[in-house]
Amino acid sequence: MSAPVDPAAVAAATLGDAGYGLLIGGEWRGAAGGATFAVTNPATGEHLADVPDAGAAEARTAVEAAHAALPDWAATPAPARAAVLRKAAALMLDEQERLATVMTLEQGKPLAEARGEIAYAASFLSWFAGEAERVYGSTIPASAAGKRLLVLRQPVGVAAMITPWNFPAAMITRKLGPALAAGCTAVVKPAEQTPLSALELGRVFARAGLPPGALNLVTCRDPQPFSETIFADERVRKVSFTGSTEVGKLLIRQSADTVKRLSLELGGNAPFIVFADADLDAAVRGAIASKFRNAGQTCVCANRIFVQREVYDRFAELFAAQVAGLRVGNGLDPASVIGPLIDEQARAKVERHVADAIAGGAAVLAGGRPAPVGANFWAPTVLANATADMLVAREETFGPVAPLIPFGDEDEALALANDTPFGLAAYFYTRDVGRVWRVAEGLEYGIVGVNDPIPSTAQAPFGGVKQSGLGREGGPTGINEYLEEKYVSLAL
Ligand code: SIN
């Protein structure tokens, strides 16, 4: 047995007493009037640190700094920009253990997942370092003999990024990597629950040699003044946001007055389909990996598990037995595989969804209640005989709750899976190669995992259709979100 972990002692040893500031124009500074807000550990409720509570004035200063840094950074040769990104990725990996511990302290995810996220976050910097060197333009055959037609690809300009708490490092680098690679400068506002990982990234980039002002970090408790300021500012040419569909719709409206380019990674309602011909053991392992990653708090987590009737009982039995054995606890404890939910609001939503399913006739095969570990913990839950009209199937639960819904044939599975306004990620398990093509093509989603519960990777495009968002991050096209095409027609 390992010794019990003392989260307060780990926090003191990891965070030190250097304190955290806003990063603006290459300087660490406080907010006006010394305003701060507290960052707490969701597993224990303990206070971790105070960070500056910026308002509209600091957001404006950050935009000014990014705007001032833009000409030099955009003119920096691509291999030199790439070298900074590669150096930052290497520094993140050198510091993986400490950065992962900071993340677990403020976000709650098990340390093993946090280490994985630091590597995942660094991989976006390495990938886009390579892409920086391959921003090719093109020539187009002209219809007039005396003309030459060229297409240049240039940075969009100052890019603002609003990032979520569920992946406090990777959702920043998935935006910042391509932005810096393209020659844009950035103003980043991390989620108020998890600003420390973002500020740690700021330190990493400073050590990697990123020029002052190319990255500015603004922390604030209330996102509204920040958001209003950057959307009103003509100098901000691009906004990238990861978060809820509700907020995404608000940002689309806010972007209208200054006609900004937007990338939006919004909510999902991922179907996970198990066909009768699937390798059931693999499907059970996959459903656990997809559903319970980050305690169910990812936009791509399986939200609705559809199981073909012939194998429904067997799958439910195997799945529930394994879920019941998942260890819930503080993410700092190496034995924990399920950490806390981010806050009381998140826990209340999970409770409401489970109560609604039970009232509607679902049977609890595992969990179904809070876990007696701390205020924000919920026992991993399996609900049998769920139906498509329950809250657990209509809304994204964002918690460790797996509703099992039986289906008859392939057409019914596709109809159920597509019956949602969302279209981020979908999964299915089968060994029939014809079905692989039919179902992959029939699913109205931006990402499809076939016998693969974790398709996310820096090399592939990530993004949704329908109300799950606009644009793609990562992959060979991710850098396009931060580039403008300029057509040049030359008469000889
Ligand atoms: C997300 O939840 O939005 C990110 C998940 C991933 O990158 O796999």
Image: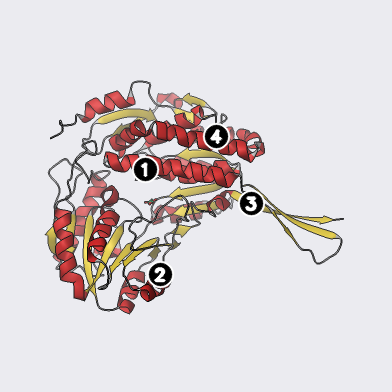
Given contact means CB atoms under 8 Å apart, are the residues at marks 2 and 4 in contact? Answer: no
Q: Which residue is mark 4?
A: 84
Name the quadrant containing residue 420: bottom left
How crowded is the residue under tag 2: few (<14 C-alpha within 10 Å), some, or many (20+)?
Answer: some
Left or right placement of residue 143 versus residue 475 in this view: right
Q: Give amino acid for label 1.
A: Glu
Disc marking residue 117 = 1
Residue type, numbered disc 2: Ala
Q: Quadrant of the N terminus?
A: top left
What whole-number distance in Å separates the C-alpha atoms at marks 2 and 4? 38 Å
Residue at disc 4, secondary structure: helix
Q: Position of residue 70 (x, y in %)?
A: 62, 37
In the rendered structure, find residue 68 and report the number of the disc placed on it. none
Q: CA distance from mark 2 to mark 3?
A: 32 Å
Which residue is labeled 2 in the image?
Answer: 440
Instruction: Determine crowd level at label 1: few under 14, some 14-19, many 20+ residues with C-alpha closer than 10 A.
Output: many
Secondary element at image label 2: helix
